[in-house]
Amino acid sequence: MRRKLLLGNWKMNKTSAEAKEFALETKELVELASKNNIDIGVAPTYLSLAAVKENADKRMIVAAQNCHFNDHGAFTGEISIPMLQEFGIDWVLIGHSERRAYDNETNFKCHEKIKALLANKMVPVYCVGETLGEFEAGETKDVVSAQVKQGLEGFSAEEVKDIVIAYEPVWSIGTGKNASTEIAQDVCGFIRNILRELFGKVADEIRILYGGSVKPENIKAYLSCPDIDGGLVGGASLKKESYEGLLTNIL
Ligand code: 13P
C-alpha cells in the first residue's frame, strides 16, 4: 500500500522569515496528515531549508529543489549533498521542468544527481513531463519514456524502491490548465509500466505524483486515480489556507 504524498514546491518564493512563519503555522496540519497516514512536505529555496527544518513539525518532509552530484569543487553557485545533509535534508527534487528549461538539466545530468542521492540513501523526487509542443505532436509517451529510462538507467530495484516520480506536463504548470484526470492517469500508469519493465514488482511500491495546476478543488480527483499517489504543487502550496485545503480534501 503506497502512502499518499503531498509535496509543495515553493520555487523562488518566500524569504526565510516567511518560510519560518509557514513552518510554524502548519504544525497542526502535519500532525493531521500524520494521523491520516499521509506524508506531507515542502521544497523551500536553499536559504530557507534551515528555517523550515528547525521550525516545522519534525514529520514535515523538507526537500531541496536541486543539488549538485559532486560533493565539492569548483562549481560556482551550486550546493552539494553533504551541505544538505548537514541540515538534515534528505529529499531533493530532480529535473524539474523549470530547471530543464532554464538550466540545461538533461536526462543524463538528472541521472548523475539521482545516482549521487541514492548512494547517500536520500530520496530523489524525479520530475518528468512533456512540453506543449510535444503534447500537441503526440510525443508525450516517447518523451516521458526517455526521461524515466535515461534518468533511472542501471539502478537496482532495491536502490529505487523509495524514489518518487512526479509527472508534470509542462503545459499545465502555472497555467491553470491542469491535465484531465484521464490524461494524468494514462501517463502515470504508463510510467508505472516502465518501472515494472525496469525493476519488476518494486514498481508497485514507487510513488508517482501528478503536478501542474493542482488546487484544493481538483486534488481529490487526481488522488482517486489508481496510479497517482499524490501531488507536487506549486502556487497552491504557498499559502497556509490553500495548503490546508489540499490536505483536507484528500483525507
Ligand atoms: P503549479 O502548481 O503552480 O502549476 O506548479 C506545479 C509545479 O511545477 C510543481 O513542481
Image: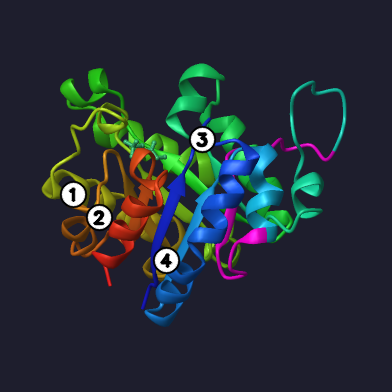
Position of 157 relative to 11 (above/below): below
- The residue indicated by pointer 1 is 186
Could you give the CA–CA distance between mark 4 and mark 2, rounded to whole angstroms?
Answer: 14 Å
Disc 4 marks which residue? 200
| Dot 3 crowding, Cα within 10 Å, few <14, some 14–19, many 20+ | many
* Residue located beneath label 2 in the image: 189
Categorize mark 2 by other alpha carbons within 10 Å: few (<14), some (14-19), many (20+): some
* Pointer 1 residue Cβ closer than 8 Å to ligand 1: no
Q: Is residue 181 left or right of residue 194?
A: left
Q: Secondary structure at mark 3?
A: loop
Mark 4 or mark 2: which is in front? 2
Amino acid marked by disc 2: Gly
The reply to whether the C-beta atoms of the residues labelled 1 and 2 are less than 8 Å apart is yes
193 left or right of 234? Answer: left
Q: Of helix, strand and loop, which mostly describes the magenta segment?
A: loop
The secondary element bearing badge 2 is classed as helix
What range of the chain is rendered magenta? Answer: 55-71
